[in-house]
Image (spheres, helix red, strand yellow):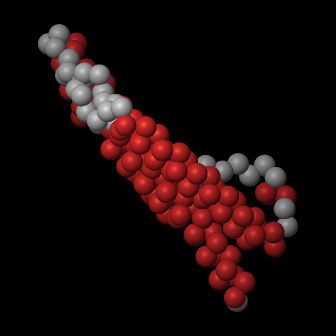
Amino acid sequence: MMGLTVCDVIGRYLFNSPIKGASELTELLLCAVIFVGLGAVSLAEDHVTVDLLTEKMPQAVHPSRQALTGALSGLILVVIAWRLWIYADQIGGYGGQTTNLGIPIAPLGYFCAVCAFVGGLITAFLPLRRFIRRLQE
């Protein structure tokens, strides 16, 4: 994506000849990178968090809080995946494609839905597994 942008800018400003469809390709690649990154962020448990109140909570509350927030976050991602799948079906139904290059958009929607679903499962599973292991100790 970065190479495409650099070549497009060089072509545009030095040779007055931008790459045809570079902005469309950049948009599609950016979407794919974000949703692929969701799974990696979920595995590393590196989601953005704000701990204004959690610092003041007793230490004993943290495992159950983490399990609950992980389950809710995972559920939200699964709902997002479901809605993305429906939206991709709609786009595929009318044959939606990019303006200049004519690339079908529905497959990207399905890809994003699958990535969001996997990210949701991981986001819910890891804190719940840790909580259950702690209860078994």
Please determine whether, in this image, residue 68 is positioned above or below residue 30.
below
What x and y, as percent, mark residue 61? 81, 69
Q: Nearer the viewer, residue 95 or 2?
A: 95
Quadrant of the rendered structure where residue 12 is? Answer: top left
Quadrant of the rendered structure where residue 18 is? Answer: top left
- With 2 as the anchor, is 33 left or right in this view? right
Residue 13: tell me if it is visible. Answer: yes
What x and y, as percent, mark residue 101? 22, 26
Residue 6: tell me if it is visible. Answer: no
Q: Nearer the viewer, residue 39 or 81?
A: 81
> Residue visible at 72% across and 64% down?
68
Please determine whether, in this image, residue 136 is positioned above or below residue 30.
below
> Residue visible at 65% across and 62% down?
70
Q: Which residue appears farthest toward the front when viewing the image?
A: 93
Q: Split into 4 quadrants, where in the image is the C terminus?
A: bottom right
Q: Which residue appears farthest toward the bottom when viewing the image?
A: 137
Q: Split into 4 quadrants, where in the image is the N terminus?
A: top left
What x and y, as percent, mark residue 22? 26, 26
What x and y, as percent, mark residue 112? 42, 47
- With 134 as the anchor, is 45 left or right in this view? left
> Residue visible at 24% across and 28% down?
102
> Residue visible at 70% across and 48% down?
50
